[in-house]
Amino acid sequence: MQDRAERKLIQNAMKAPYLALEEEQDLAKRWSKKQDQQALHQLTVSHMRLVIAMAARFRNFGLPMADLIQEGHIGLLEAAARFDPERGVRFSTYATWWIRASMQDYVLRNWSIVRGGTSSAQKALFFKFRRLKAKLQKSMGTSGEIHEEAAKLLGVSPADVAMMDARLSGPDLSLNAPMRDEGEASAERMEFIPSDDDPVDETVEHMIDGERRAVWLSKALDILDRRELQIIRERRLSDEGATLEALGTALGISKERVRQIESRAIEKLRSVLVREHPALLGGAA
């Protein structure tokens, strides 16, 4: 069903009449100045053969032709929205860049689960390296030589070329795929990836210690007077952390005075915490 719809789309596109320059200009003006939907339809339909021809160039990436055509059509609509008929340039010339760019972005998003080709140089490397590699292999023997020469020609580093060569040489591997292709269940690749997290016992220990220190601090805050407590809460215990200047304005004192009160309050807290909980001695407070 999908193949039939694709063939019909291509057939209809090939039957669409070519536009003369004057007719093309008239349609573009009607769309840009009056938002005439019928003019836009005629302009884009007559250029769908350009989209199809461009999509055929990207078939080697293994993506559905229909999807490539759809992405190219999006690029065609973008070109129509930006086209200035007053410049005297043929619409097909202008639209070619937008169609190609739209298809390239689609290929980069869907060819691999690994995101790549974010810069113009990287995009050129992705789309040109395979053809360039085949050409260089005729005159160069080692991969290192090929990577060095390709890097010079494409304006990227040899390391980038080597990485792209590896990406283009093999398919993505699923982390959920079994390590061995056997009839019985086997471990998945994901199970062999080392975790960056702390061990569970250390995580629990840190959580308990954090909760214990929070209780100690809450009790120690009782020794502070009202102004000291306000400064410590707004400077040290809030997510945003008030500035010395803002607190000075709110309390009617200078920011230097706020700093002095803050330092005194911190010293009072440190003293009571170390006295009540000697294990904190040495910087744990």
Image (cartoon, rainbow, N blue to C red):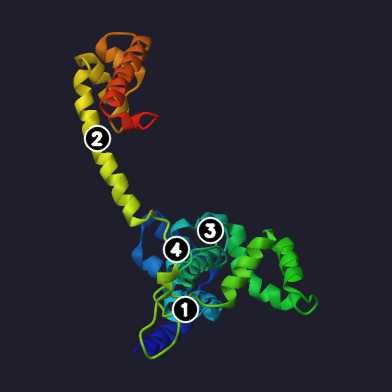
N-terminal of the pair, mark 2 or mark 1, is 1
| Spatial CA span between label 4 and label 1 | 33 Å
| Secondary structure category for the residue under label 2 | helix
Q: Is residue 170 above or below residue 29?
A: below
Q: Amino acid at mark 2?
A: Ala
Question: Looking at the picture, how far across and down is residue 55, in whole percent?
Answer: 51, 77
Q: Which residue is mark 3?
A: 118
Q: Which residue is mark 2?
A: 214
Q: Which residue is mark 1?
A: 63
Q: Amino acid at mark 3?
A: Thr
| Spatial CA span between label 2 and label 1 | 56 Å
Q: Residue at x 57, y 71 (%)?
A: 167
Check disc 3: other Cα within 10 Å, few if <14, some if 14-19, many if 20+: few
Q: Which residue is mark 4?
A: 194
Q: Amino acid at mark 1?
A: Leu
Q: Quadrant of residue 60?
A: bottom right
In the image, is 86 to the left or to the right of 285?
A: right
| Secondary structure category for the residue under label 4 | loop
